[in-house]
Amino acid sequence: MTRGGRIKDRETPERRCIVTGEVQPKAGLIRFVAGPDGEVWPDLAEKLPGRGFWVVADRPALDKAAAKGLFSRGAKARVTAPPELLAMIETGLARRVTDTLSLARKAGLAVAGFEKVKDWLAAGKAKVLLQASDGSERGKGKLWTPPGGRWFGCMTASELGLSFGRDHVIHSALAPGGLTEKLIRDASRLTGLRGHDGGASAGKE
């Protein structure tokens, strides 16, 4: 059982955030490593060698880690955070979401466009609804979060468009699968940086 009193799920890897001190599933945190030059680097794929330290995917927490020298505590060595660290994380997460969505499209696991997305939602084929942050609220409100699924509004129309070879995409849906679970992790982290509510519903239930 964790300090918060909830029952610990042994199947879910957990890590401690160096800012909050809380232990939580690592899907909600970002891993960092110290480079040979003493600079902190985000390890979004969680594959870089070296001692890893973790920060919750939240802009205020990441700002605090950089401003208060908490990365040095996590690395157990004196390290510095580059000024563009948060921009690097945001850009990297957006690219990962775009790339995963593109792979899902090629595998037949993702569609774009209002009518296609609406058909998938109506048929119960969708696990995730992605809608552009800069799309029309009225148009987005006509679709709904998949029952038991997720909605994300952390990507722009041009970013979503990259995944489908278009200039822009407002609505996209993903079917269940490994790629979709990967996208959920990265989109959740990106939501923490950009401030869009990745857990809320779209227009209607």
Image: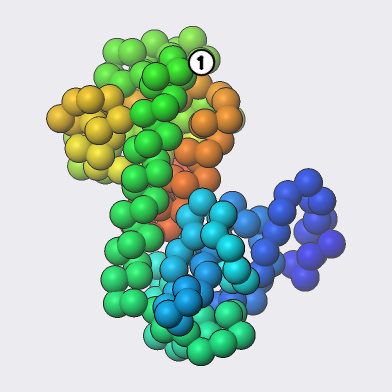
Label 1: state its secondary structure.
Answer: loop
Q: Viewed as shown, does residue 146 lie left or right of 8?
A: left
Location of residue 72 in the rendering, given as x and y in whole percent from the top left corner? 53, 85
Q: Viewed as shown, does residue 21 lie left or right of 135?
A: right
Q: Viewed as shown, does residue 71 lie left or right of 204?
A: right
Kindly identify which residue carries mark 1: 125
Using the image, determine if residue 107 lies above or below residue 161.
Answer: above
User: Where the N terminus falls, by quadrant?
Assistant: bottom right
Residue shown at 57% from the left, 25% from the top: 177
Residue shown at 20% from the left, 42% from the top: 134
Tag 1: residue type?
Answer: Lys
Q: Front-most of 142 and 55?
A: 55
Tell me if residue 64 can be seen.
no
Using the image, determine if residue 11 lies above or below residue 43.
Answer: above
Q: Front-most of 72 and 147?
A: 72
Q: Front-most of 127 and 37?
A: 37
Using the image, determine if residue 81 lies above or below residue 184.
Answer: below
